[in-house]
Amino acid sequence: MNINKLLTHFSNYIPLNEEEVNELSKRVVERNVKRKEFILQKNDICNNYTFIVSGLFKMYTVDKNGAEHILHFASENDWICDINSFHNKKQSLLYIDAIEPSTIIQIDNSNLMYLFTHYQKFDRTFRVLIENKFMELENRILQNISSKAEERYQFFLEQYPNICNRIPNVLIASYLGITPEFLSKIRNAISKK
Amino acid sequence: MNINKLLTHFSNYIPLNEEEVNELSKRVVERNVKRKEFILQKNDICNNYTFIVSGLFKMYTVDKNGAEHILHFASENDWICDINSFHNKKQSLLYIDAIEPSTIIQIDNSNLMYLFTHYQKFDRTFRVLIENKFMELENRILQNISSKAEERYQFFLEQYPNICNRIPNVLIASYLGITPEFLSKIRNAISKK
DNA sequence: ATTTTTTCTTAATATAGTTTAAGATTTATT
DNA sequence: AATAAATCTTAAACTATATTAAGAAAAAAT
């Protein structure tokens, strides 16, 4: 099993000792996911925290008109989870599916709670993880309330150089909150500079 | 000292035992803050997690044109902190000041780290705290990328009924990412329905 | 290899939101 | 109570972004 990437990931926060590695290994499941396959759909309860070994996912809502609005992208060495649904066992409003064929490692709610309860380190690591994600969202909010679409696009390209050329512009537009037609216009304007 | 409100707040997550209450009490400081007084300014390092006993604060950036962009409001029984500056000891890009005369309880970086290290409960509680704030930001992002200003305004009024009438519309506009003039137009349109 | 589906672009027209300016109202300060 | 400062509103002109439609290019599926 491809758990090394997950262990390396943890060691960037706080390295795990042998016992913790064993406990973790027992409690996670590896899966391959095809392109366009869902790992969460609306009205499901999100029962897993998902670590991405390789590949790329999007998490999004679909509005009454059928339009997707992308809340997060997540690629290798990142986590994806609807934590509202996960922690409160509520039906999710979100979809998560694979943009590329992917390999993931999942830990379900009861196993993660077990680790939280028995090993302080996991509580700590997941606190720091979510703090980092919180800061990213704060930056995104600031961008959204203070910048024009063109600046937000440029910022996206700078901030996610590893994924921006793996994602079709339709989806980038949806993430930025603009139409694909307008993104096209922006790209044209940038290329003329 | 007005620490009861803070203890009640913690007990909504996980109640503290006597030792934890003592440790916490020793490590926090109470302060009164006047209207318009700063508790964080740009280029300072945010050295405190601030719990609001009473009153109301705004956290914001100021752009090159001098315009404020409000990232968070926070009122009684809530926390406010630039966690990027706090955890990474980096100079903050943000200001925090009081919209109303306020009473706060602060815990500084080294004291909070002490509690995290010696009592698992605090690590846990602050994880859950930040998870809740993360979910709020996710909702705000979704609103921003998928809704018109009028819907975002209505949603703000519903979500923060306790603070929306304590905050001037100029500041609500800044939080929503629109101009005060346009908010005025929106309010006029709503009142005619 | 061909067909189907998805993606990207362009352009015309429409709508959402900004800017500037000014006056009226409310709130804070002396 | 009087003055100063901040807030709220209106309106006209402007800019950013959406919508509709259609065709070209690229990628995926058969």
Image (cartoon, coloured by chain):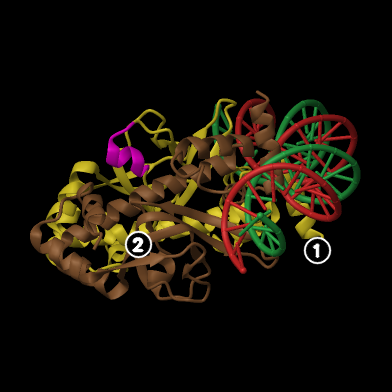
Chain colours: A brown, B yellow, C green, D red
Image coordinates for residue C6, horizontal then vertical, percent: 63, 57
Bin the neighbour count of mark 2 within 10 Å (Cα to Cα): few under 14, some 14-19, many 20 and up.
Answer: many
Q: Residue at x 40, y 59 (%)?
A: A102
Q: Nearer the viewer, residue A62 or B46?
A: A62
Is B12 inside the magenta-drawn segment?
Answer: no
Q: Determine whether, in the image, residue A21 is placed left or right of residue C2.
A: left
Q: Residue at x 18, y 50 (%)?
A: A14
Is B88 inside the magenta-drawn segment?
Answer: yes
Q: Nearer the viewer, residue A169 or B167?
A: A169
Image coordinates for residue A24, horizontal then vertical, percent: 19, 65
The chain containing the residue under callout 2 comes to A
The chain containing the residue under callout 1 comes to B
Q: Determine whether, in the image, residue B66 is placed left or right of residue D1.
A: left
Marks 1/2: CA–CA distance: 50 Å
The residue wearing badge 1 is: B193
* Total tally of numbered discs in the picture: 2
The residue wearing badge 2 is: A104
Q: Nearer the viewer, residue A16 or B84?
A: A16
Q: Nearer the viewer, residue A94 or B1?
A: A94
Asked whether the viewer can see residue A94, the reply is yes
Most extreme residue toward the top is A193
Q: Quadrant of residue A45?
A: bottom left
Q: Three-letter amino acid code at disc 2? A: Ile
